[in-house]
C-alpha cells in the first residue's frame, strides 16, 4: 500500500514514478545494470585520427591545428579545430548502433555538417550526409579520412554542386602529428 501511495503522489506531482520490483520500502531504487561498454573493433575504427595534429593544405600551407580525443568511456571522439585564421569548430564522432554506421556532427560558426558512414576495406573512413549553412542553404556533403604509411592522415571533403551536377572539392588537409614538447 505504501508503494501505491508513493506512486500516486509522484504521478500527481508529474514525476512519472514507476515502482521497481524488489525495491525496499524505504524508497531506495534497485541498482541499475551498467550500460554496455564501447569496447570492440567497430569502436576503434576511427582511432587512427586520435591525437594532436598540425594540418596543412596539399601544397604545404598551414591550415590549422586539430585535437582529437576519446571521451565517454571510448564511446565518443571529440574534435577541436582551430584554423590558421582563427576560425574554430568542433565535432562529435560516434558509432551509431541504430544506423550501424559512424556519425559525425560538426558545428562551426558558418555551418553544421551531419553525416554517416563506415571504414572501408582499404582502411579509409568515408562519411556522407548534408552541410547546412547559417544562411539556410544546404547541400549533399561527403568526407574521407585516409591513414597514410608515414603516419599522416589525409582528410578530403567534397560538396555536391547541383548546377554542374558534380562533386566539388571543399577542403583537403594533410594531418601531421604535432611534435612532442621537450
Image (spheres, rainbow, N blue to C red):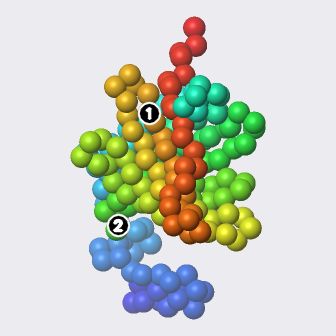
Residue annotated with mark 2 = 99
Determine the image quadrant of residue 50.
top left
Q: Secondary structure at mark 2?
A: loop
In this picture, residue 131 sits left or right of residue 143: right
The x, y position of residue 165, in whole percent, is 51, 67
Determine the image quadrant of residue 63.
top right
Q: Nearer the viewer, residue 68 or 28?
A: 68
Residue annotated with mark 1 = 153
Q: Total number of numbered labels?
A: 2
Which mark is nearer the camera, 2 or 1?
Answer: 1
Residue under the point 36% across and 71% down: 24
Residue under the point 57% across and 8% down: 182
Q: Is residue 38 visible?
A: yes
Residue under the point 34% across and 68% down: 98
The x, y position of residue 153, in whole percent, is 44, 33
Q: Secondary structure at mark 1?
A: strand
In this picture, residue 9 sits left or right of residue 42: right
Q: Nearer the viewer, residue 8 or 163?
A: 163
Q: Are marks 2 and 1 in contact (CB under 8 Å)?
A: no
Q: CA distance from mark 2 to mark 1?
A: 25 Å
Q: Is residue 50 visible?
A: no
Q: Quadrant of the N terminus?
A: bottom left
The x, y position of residue 80, in whole percent, is 60, 41
Of the numbered discs 2 and 1, the one sitting upstream in the chain is: 2
Residue under the point 32% across and 49% down: 119
Question: Please, which residue is most extreme toward the top here?
Answer: 182
Amino acid at each position: 500500500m505504501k508503494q501505491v501511495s508513493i506512486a500516486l503522489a509522484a504521478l500527481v506531482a508529474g514525476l512519472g514514478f514507476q515502482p521497481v520490483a524488489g525495491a525496499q520500502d524505504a524508497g531506495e531504487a534497485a541498482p541499475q545494470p551498467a550500460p554496455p561498454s564501447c569496447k570492440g573493433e567497430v569502436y576503434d575504427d576511427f582511432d587512427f585520427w586520435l591525437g594532436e595534429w598540425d594540418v596543412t593544405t596539399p601544397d604545404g600551407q598551414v591550415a590549422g591545428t586539430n585535437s582529437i580525443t576519446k571521451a565517454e568511456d571510448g564511446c565518443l571522439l571529440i574534435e577541436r579545430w582551430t584554423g590558421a585564421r582563427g576560425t574554430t569548430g568542433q565535432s562529435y564522432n560516434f558509432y551509431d548502433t541504430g544506423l550501424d554506421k559512424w556519425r559525425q556532427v560538426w558545428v562551426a560558426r558558418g555551418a553544421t555538417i551531419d553525416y554517416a558512414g563506415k571504414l572501408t576495406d582499404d582502411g579509409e573512413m568515408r562519411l556522407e550526409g548534408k552541410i547546412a549553412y547559417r544562411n539556410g542553404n544546404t547541400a549533399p556533403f561527403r568526407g574521407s579520412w585516409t591513414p597514410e604509411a608515414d603516419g599522416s592522415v589525409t582528410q578530403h571533403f567534397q560538396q555536391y554542386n547541383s548546377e554542374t551536377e558534380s562533386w566539388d572539392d571543399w577542403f583537403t588537409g594533410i594531418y601531421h602529428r604535432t611534435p612532442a614538447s621537450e
